[in-house]
Amino acid sequence: MNPSTGAGRAGDLVRAAARELQAAGVASPRRDAEALLGHVLDRDQAELSRALLMGESVGEGERAAYDRLVAERAARVPLQHLTGQAHFRHLTLRVGPGVFVPRPETEVLVDLALTDLRERGRDRPVVVDLCTGSGAIALALAHEWPAAQVHAVELSEDAHAWAAANVERSGLALDLRLGDATVAFDDLVGAVDVVVSNPPYIPPGSVPVDPEVRDHDPEIALYGGGDDGLSVPLAVAQRAADLLVAGGVLVMEHADVQGEALVRALTAARVWSHVADHLDLTGLPRVTRAVRAPRS
Ligand SMILES: C[S@@+](CC[C@H](N)C(=O)[O-])C[C@H]1O[C@@H](n2cnc3c(N)ncnc32)[C@H](O)[C@@H]1O
């Protein structure tokens, strides 16, 4: 876009921006073009739709700001880094450089955890989120299951700072810690009802093709180690087995190609029962659920 062309109609600006984003290979050009204009004008989706419908004009300063953001998005900076926010379940979280942007496919993990919390029927169930990133899963569970006592841990100082900001803004009660999930929560060993985790799990050779992921999600959030990417997930699962009460549940996200391998590895570990894999909303294998077997 040409930043020197002054004011313009909202609809024209969005159409031009969507064309530019499409040419740059952005997956959802129109949606992103609208989201960026909504961000610049400080309008929600409904207000922006009205502005587009009414042919509202956008002032020169706002247009210049919009042009800059569209150019950054065309350079494949994630939309969420440009708006500073990501939507997850019913929450809007602060995100930016240094933290993994929460993904819609992770929402199914929250559904599975909520089903277990409902079925367990405990008054004050203890929930732990290992590898919390922005705090997305932990905060969603604290929000949607207010009786839960939710704890979360994150290793990266940068990501932990984003999570701390999200906890503060949410007003939700959450015990957030900085540390290694594979050895965390000595004070909760054998006392946890549900462990949730979306750990790093990409195999080292499978560098993501999308620049938004490859160049902007932190490496520590992506690569799971080992030939199959399952080193960190299996170490996290082992810690989950320490933390859970007998009959407690682990719900863990994985790559779509890792469902069978993770089920096999957890079954072989002999501390889990009812190990089963679940699909995400796009029908891909995404989450493994396992029940902590009684300690011998
Ligand atoms: C794929 S991201 C998921 C973040 C968040 N759970 C979500 O779903 O949006 C994985 C997160 O695990 C963190 N992490 C990696 N290794 C860790 C470890 N050993 N202990 C705690 N956190 C770890 C990364 O920094 C990153 O924030």
Image (tube, grey):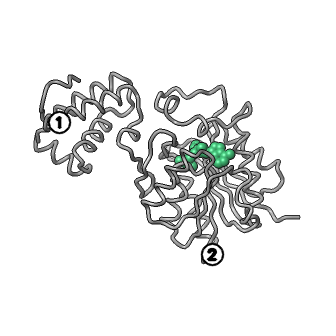
Viewer-nearest residue: 65 or 235? 65
At horizontal 43% and vertical 52% (from top left) the residue drawn is 93
Which image quadrant: the C terminus? bottom right
Q: Decide: is 142 above or below 77.
A: below
Q: How many labels does the image show?
A: 2
Q: How crowded is mark 1: few (under 14 residues within 10 Å), some or many (20 or more)?
A: few
Q: Disc 1 residue type?
A: Gly
* Image location of residue 230, percent across then percent down: 71, 39
Viewer-nearest residue: 161 or 104? 161
Q: Mark 2 points at which residue?
A: 122
Q: Is mark 2 on a helix, strand or loop?
A: loop
Q: Is mark 1 on a helix, strand or loop?
A: helix
Q: Residues within 10 Å of mark 2 (few under 14, many from 20)?
A: few
Q: Disc 2 residue type?
A: Arg
* Extreme-right residue of the structure: 296
At horizontal 41% and vertical 50% (from top left) the residue drawn is 87
